[in-house]
Image (cartoon, rainbow, N blue to C red):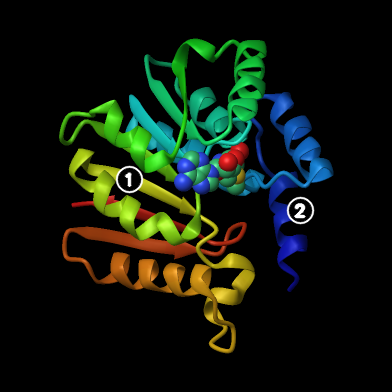
Amino acid sequence: MDCRKIENFLSRHLKFPHPLLEELYRLALEEKFPVVEPSVGNLIYFFVKLLRAKVIVEFGSGFGYSALWAALACDWNCTVHCIDYQEKNRKRAMEIFEQLGVSEKIRYHVGEAETVFSQLGFEDESIDLVLFDHEKQNYSGSLDLVLPKLKRGGVIIADDVLWRGEVADPSRENLRLSSLRFFLKEISQRGDLVSFVCPLGDGVAVIQKL
Ligand SMILES: C[S@@+](CC[C@H](N)C(=O)[O-])C[C@H]1O[C@@H](n2cnc3c(N)ncnc32)[C@H](O)[C@@H]1O
């Protein structure tokens, strides 16, 4: 079955925590701005609630669509650290966060994700949930950077890991695909992690630190 049809079906059966999320997703499609699929937003929402996450960090936040799913899930004190290269994304995201009354929960940092993450100086084992949606060739390096700061039991959700299914097609080869293949192999083989990959959106890896 066609993946687009499945995504459309799943979206129709989702409970969006705020109607603006549907509007923002439509807007992103119109603008061809890549954001997580609503089904992946819902997965993020689920894990924030499951973990009762208080400290959340996102690598690659764009105009804040995925971070919004995370922030709306917290009806407790939490901080969502968004990181993105682009100031114009920060500006737009903060307007949206303010409109939805969640801006107090957000710290939006502009810069290269790994550099900013290191500068933020998180204490060891202090982060509950990390979202990866930055350059796919960086996922593996970012994993090494993030793991010491992630709590035991904490989770990383990495989007786009199947890259339109191309990752599973051995006839396709480029740096992004080989990096994602390496990342998937690494998370499945490391003894300090447990993980699964589900084919929502462009493929999502969910990784827990043991
Ligand atoms: C797929 S979009 C993110 C969309 C967002 N997660 C959402 O679903 O709403 C990827 C974003 O990551 C940013 N980005 C990519 N690599 C980055 C890096 N190494 N450091 C900081 N930002 C990065 C881009 O500027 C872009 O806005």
Residue 157 is at least partly visible in this image = yes
What is the residue that sits farthest to the bottom in this orientation?
A: 171
Q: Position of residue 49 (x, y in %)?
A: 42, 32
From the viewer's perspective, is residue 189 above or below residue 84? below
Position of residue 141 in the picture relative to residue 97 (left or right): left
In the picture of the structure, the residue carrying the numbered disc 2 is 8
* Above or below for 129 versus 144: above
- Residue count near mark 2 (Cα–Cα under 10 Å), binned few <14, some 14–19, many ≥20: few
Name the kind of residue labelled 2 in the image.
Answer: Asn
Residue at horizontal 81 percent and vertical 41 percent from the top? 31
Seen at 50% across and 24% down, the residue is 71
Q: Quadrant of the N terminus?
A: bottom right
- Find residue 139 and report its image quarter: bottom left
Q: Which residue is mark 1?
A: 155
**Location of residue 182 in the rendering, given as x and y in whole percent from the top left corner:** 37, 72
Q: Position of residue 72 (x, y in %)?
A: 54, 24
Task: Tell me which numbered mark, 1 or 2, is placed earlier along the sequence.
Answer: 2
Quick check: 141 left or right of 98?
A: left
**Which quadrant of the render holds ligand 1?**
top right
How many numbered marks are there?
Answer: 2
> Tag 1's secondary structure?
strand
Element at label 2: helix
Q: Residue at x 44, y 39 (%)?
A: 112
Q: Position of residue 33 (x, y in %)?
A: 72, 44
